[in-house]
Amino acid sequence: MKLFKAKWGLVLRALVLVLPLIGFKALVHYLGWDVIPVGTLTSALITGTVFVVAIILAGVMTDLKESERIVSEFSASIETLYNDARLMEPDVDAAAVLSHLRDLIRVSIANFERKGSWKLSEVSPALRRIEEDVRTLNQKGKPLSILLRMRSELTTLKRLSYRVESIKETAFLPAAHAIAEVGVCAIVLVLILSAIEPFREGLLIMGVISLLLISTVLLIDDMDDPFSGHAAVDMRVIRKLDRFLDERPNGAPDSR
C-alpha cells in the first residue's frame, strides 16, 4: 500500500482536480460557451508552459539527487562514530557517545520526515552532546587518532545538517513556480473554453493534458522537500541503521 501511494498518490490527487474540470468542460459545451478556436496561439501557450515546467523540474531534480547522497553520507558518518566509540570500550564516556548517537539518529529521522522544516534547534544540541563526550575522552587520554576521526565525522554531520536545512526551507525559483502555475491554469481555462471537435475526443484531450500538467506541478511542489512526501528519497538506509543501533546495547560485542 505504501509503495502504491508513493507511485500513484500524486496522479490520484491530480485526478481529483481534473474530474471536476472535465465536468465543467461538458457544461461549458452544453451552454455553448466554448467559443475559442484551437490554433497556433493555443499551441504556443502549451509549449511555453511546458518549457517553464521542464526548467523547474530539472532544477529540483538536482536537489533530489543531492538529497539521496546526503542521507547515505549522514548514515555513514553516524556509523563511523559508532564504530570509533566501540574501540574505546569499556568506558562510561564511550558508552555515553553510543547513547547520544541513538538520540541523534532518532531526532534526525524525525526532522527528515517533517515536511518543509529541519529544526537545527533539535539536531545541533544532539551533535553538541557528542562533541562534549569526545572532549571528555580526550581529557582521559584516549587515542588521538580516533578522536580526530570522530571530530571529522562530527564536522561532516554539521555540514550535512546545514545543507538539509537549506534544501528543506528554500524553494527553488519561487517566481518560476508562480509562472508555471499561472501558465497551467491558463492552459486549462483555454482548453475548457476551446471548441475542440468532435466533442468527446476533445474532452479526452483536455482531460489528458490537464492531468499531465497538474500532476507535474504537484510533483515539483512535492520535490521541493525531497526528504518527505510522495517523491521522497529512500530513507531505508538510515532507518536500518537506527534499528541496528537499537539492537546493540552499550558494550555488547558487534556481530554485524
Image (spheres, rainbow, N blue to C red):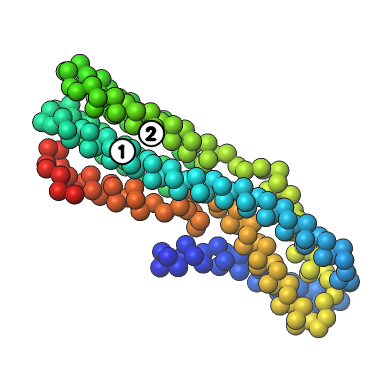
Q: Quadrant of the N terminus?
A: bottom left
Q: Residue at x 63, y 59 (%)?
A: 216
Report the number of discs: 2
Splitting the image into 4 quarters, where does residue 29 fall?
bottom right
Q: Which residue lies furthest to the front in this view?
A: 145
* Residue 184 marker: none
- The part of the image, by quadrant, that contains residue 97 is top left
Residue at x 17%, y 18% (from the top left corner): 141
Query: Residue 19: x and y, percent?
Result: 65, 72
Residue 151 or residue 170, whichever sits in front: 151
232 horizontally vs 39: left or right = left
Q: Mark 2 points at which residue?
A: 157
Crowding at mark 1 (Cα within 10 Å: few <14, some 14-19, many 20+): many
Q: What element carries label 2?
A: helix
Ranked by sequence position, the earlier of labels 2 and 1 is: 1
Q: Which mark is residue 78?
A: 1
**Which residue is at a point 35% across and 53% down the rendered structure image?**
236
Question: Does the image show residue 112?
Answer: no
x, y percent for residue 191: 79, 68
Q: Verify CB contact (< 8 Å) between mark 2 and mark 1.
A: yes
Q: Where is residue 159 in the image (x, y as percent from the top left)?
A: 44, 31
